[in-house]
């Protein structure tokens, strides 16, 4: 993805993701500055946000981050952000969520701020995912392969590492993550292996040739 949001656009995304904001179209444009309307439209054009019309009798539309936007955010948490007073609220929300996460996992802050150096994996991770997919699909593209099968084929890769790679490949258009609609098809293994994107569980992968 060649598009790089401006610091103001990044802050707008963080406010929606971390502070739970759903700004009206006009409010979002105003916060984005002099070129607010065009920058808002650009975010929508790039698929990072969507504008949802309000139900009558209300008028206008509200902005919301898309699944593509969530995937982009995961890969760009270090993106430059506008240094304005509007950044305080999402920062506070991130710190609150971080505190809950550490308490739930029994982690110390030092483990977050000073993590151990990751051990390098042999070969290119995207190539290994692609190889695993086509092995499981008997060499066919456009075939549904369960995420749990992909994970079982690559046991040496951490769940977080594989999630990040899969989401990055989806952003690049190299694969597509989908949900299983038939609840009877979903096994406990599918539940455990699923990737949660904006509250939606993704259980299967489709990949082009």
Image: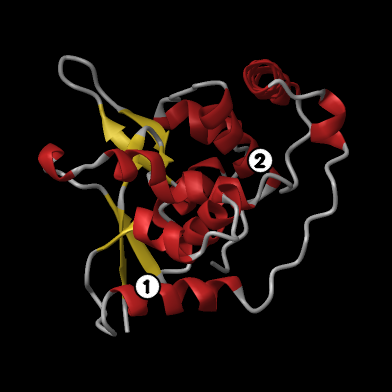
Q: Quadrant of the C terminus?
A: bottom left
Q: Which residue is mark 1?
A: 133
At x 49%, y 21%, the residue is 20
Give coordinates of residue 42: x percent, y percent.
47, 53
At x 40%, y 62%, the residue is 150
State the residue in front, 55 or 162: 162
Q: Which residue is mark 2?
A: 8
State the residue in front, 154 or 128: 154
Q: Is residue 18 found left or right of 122 in the rendered image?
A: left
Q: Is residue 190 above or below residue 138?
A: above
Query: Label 1 near label 2: C-beta < 8 Å?
Result: no
Distance CA(mark 2)–CA(mark 1): 38 Å
Q: Is residue 194 visible?
A: yes
Give coordinates of residue 94: x percent, y percent.
66, 24
Q: Is residue 92 found left or right of 158 in the rendered image?
A: right
Q: Quadrant of the N terminus?
A: bottom right
Which of the 4 image quadrants contains residue 8? top right
Q: Is residue 118 found left or right of 14 in the rendered image?
A: right
Q: Can you tell which of label 2 and label 1 is closer to the viewer? A: 1
Q: Is residue 43 found left or right of 145 in the rendered image?
A: right
Q: Is residue 66 visible?
A: no
- The number of callouts visible is 2
At x 71%, y 20%, the residue is 106
Give coordinates of residue 21: x percent, y percent.
49, 22
- Looking at the rendered structure, the secondary structure element under dot 1 is helix
- Looking at the rendered structure, the secondary structure element under dot 2 is helix
């Amino acid at each position: 993805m060649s598009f790089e949001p401006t610091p103001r656009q990044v802050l707008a995304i963080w406010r929606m993701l971390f502070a739970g904001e759903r700004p009206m179209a006009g409010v979002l444009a105003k916060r984005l500055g002099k070129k607010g309307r065009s920058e808002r439209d650009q975010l929508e054009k790039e698929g990072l946000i969507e504008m949802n019309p309000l139900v009558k009798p209300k008028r206008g539309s509200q902005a919301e981050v898309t699944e593509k936007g969530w995937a982009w955010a995961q890969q760009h948490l270090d993106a430059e952000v506008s240094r304005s007073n509007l950044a305080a609220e999402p920062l506070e929300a991130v710190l609150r969520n971080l505190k809950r996460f550490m308490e739930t996992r029994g982690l110390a802050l030092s483990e977050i701020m000073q993590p151990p150096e990751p051990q390098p994996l042999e070969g290119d991770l995207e190539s290994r995912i692609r190889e695993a997919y086509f092995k499981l699909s008997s060499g066919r593209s456009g075939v549904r392969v369960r995420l749990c099968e992909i994970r079982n084929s690559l046991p040496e890769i951490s769940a977080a590492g594989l999630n990040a790679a899969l989401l990055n490949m989806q952003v690049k258009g190299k694969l597509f993550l989908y949900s299983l609609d038939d609840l009877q098809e979903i096994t406990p293994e599918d539940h455990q292996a699923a990737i949660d994107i904006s509250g939606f569980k993704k259980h299967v992968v489709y990949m082009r040739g």
